[in-house]
């Protein structure tokens, strides 16, 4: 646990160092979420913050599904022609298999370098977007840890590669570059099929917050909650002859998404709705704000469905939209409250986040570097 706590505490430590040397740049006065901040924090600080996260995540072994990924990597033949002949082109993730084969045959047979490379790709993508669009990079980094977004890099890393790469393509969603985004989505679907959900989400995310499309989406979510069992039974029958056959049978042994997670991810869209009149002008001018609010609403709705159905299956879907909360939450605090109120709310919210982190974080850390640490 000490490793995870050090990752959380690393953020305020580096923020303090930054604050002491850049006091005049800490308080933003001309932040525009549409274009991103006009003066980003020095790249060195961003690398130091996320570099620490990436190091520990990349050095892990035997955490969650990492051990299965390591086993699969070890089983890849070191000879390229042999490994290539064994690709399952009809499987769920031929693109990921090809990436692994190329890495092992031409870069390194050491799985630790492989894990570290994937952690670097995912972490840097998140870092780049937060540095561009977050009005408080350090608070967004703090949220990345305390909202447990980082855990997806250790449990579900194949899916998180898709999340991170789609996140770094967020400008295409903002600018309406659908076909560019579609190409990336289709390519990344060879890594993880769940990325295809970003196609319909693209159209919902670009709508005005709280308009009829969002209303229809919420109604759809409610119906899914009410008719969850027959709905997913139908999905299971549809997938009967595919690689995902029987996936929904996990519902029987899955208690669903933790209600605490649902509660915490309901806070940003609730706050955005509460302050919608104050944000009205922002909604008219800033497509990026609209996207962040809509993505936050989708996240909360999907987690709600996951609470009543499956945390294993449905609960894995919101990560594609969850990352936008890392931009939205600091913006709402900065835009909707005066300085004194914002300070109080941030402190209270920060304490609540630490409590959430404590209750939900992994109970152990394992790597060849540290051994087993409880």
Image (cartoon, rainbow, N blue to C red):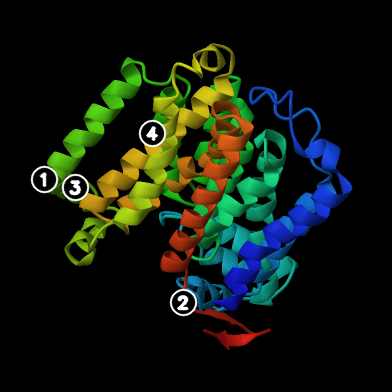
* Picture residue at 21% right of the left edge, 53% below the top: 240
The reply to whether callout 2 and callout 1 are in contact (CB within 8 Å) is no
From the image, tell me which residue sits under label 2: 363
Mark closer to the observer (3, 2): 2
Quadrant in which the N terminus appears: bottom right
The CA span between labels 2 and 1 is 36 Å
The CA span between labels 1 and 4 is 30 Å
**311 left or right, relative to 227:** right
Expressed as whole percent of the image width and height from the top left, the position of residue 35 reads: 69, 23
Q: Quadrant of residue 40?
A: top right
Mark closer to the observer (2, 1): 2
Expressed as whole percent of the image width and height from the top left, the position of residue 9 reads: 65, 64
The CA span between labels 1 and 3 is 6 Å
From the image, tell me which residue sits under label 1: 230
The CA span between labels 2 and 4 is 31 Å
Nearest to N terminus: mark 1 or mark 4: 1
Q: Residues within 10 Å of mark 4 (few under 14, many from 20)?
A: some
* Residue 162, visible in the rendered structure: no
Badge 3 element:
helix
Mark closer to the observer (4, 3): 4
* Picture residue at 43% right of the left edge, 23% below the top: 203
Q: Residue furthest front?
A: 340
């Amino acid at each position: 646990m000490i490793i995870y706590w050090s990752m959380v505490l690393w953020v305020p430590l580096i923020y303090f160092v930054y604050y002491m040397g850049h006091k005049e740049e800490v308080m933003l006065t001309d932040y525009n979420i549409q274009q991103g901040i006009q003066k980003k924090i020095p790249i060195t600080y961003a690398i130091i913050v996320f570099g620490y996260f990436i190091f520990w995540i990349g050095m892990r072994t035997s955490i969650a599904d990492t051990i299965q990924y390591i086993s699969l990597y070890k089983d890849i033949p070191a000879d390229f022609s042999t490994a290539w002949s064994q690709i399952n082109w009809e499987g769920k993730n031929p693109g990921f298999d090809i990436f692994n084969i190329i890495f092992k045959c031409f870069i390194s047979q050491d799985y630790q370098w492989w894990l570290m490379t994937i952690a670097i790709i995912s972490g840097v993508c998140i870092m780049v977007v937060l540095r561009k669009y977050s009005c408080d990079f350090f608070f967004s980094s703090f949220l990345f840890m305390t909202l447990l977004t980082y855990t997806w890099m250790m449990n579900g890393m194949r899916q998180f590669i898709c999340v991170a790469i789609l996140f770094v393509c967020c400008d295409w969603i903002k600018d309406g570059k659908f076909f560019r985004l579609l190409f990336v989505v289709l390519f990344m679907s060879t890594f993880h099929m769940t990325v295809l959900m970003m196609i319909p989400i693209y159209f919902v995310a670009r709508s005005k917050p709280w308009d009829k499309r969002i209303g229809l989406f919420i109604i759809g979510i409610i119906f899914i909650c009410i008719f969850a069992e027959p709905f997913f039974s139908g999905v299971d029958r549809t997938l009967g002859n595919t690689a995902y056959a029987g996936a929904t049978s996990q519902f029987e042994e899955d208690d669903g998404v933790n209600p605490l997670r649902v509660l915490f991810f309901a806070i940003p869209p609730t706050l955005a709705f509460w302050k919608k009149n104050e944000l009205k002008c922002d909604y008219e001018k800033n497509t990026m704000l609209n996207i962040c609010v809509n993505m936050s609403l989708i996240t909360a709705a999907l987690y709600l469905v996951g609470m009543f159905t499956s945390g294993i299956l449905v609960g894995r879907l919101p990560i594609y939209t969850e990352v936008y909360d890392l931009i939205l939450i600091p913006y709402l605090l900065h835009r909707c409250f005066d300085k004194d109120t914002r300070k109080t709310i941030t402190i209270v919210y920060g304490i609540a986040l630490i409590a959430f982190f404590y209750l939900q974080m992994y109970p152990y850390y394992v790597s060849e570097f540290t051994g087993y640490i409880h």
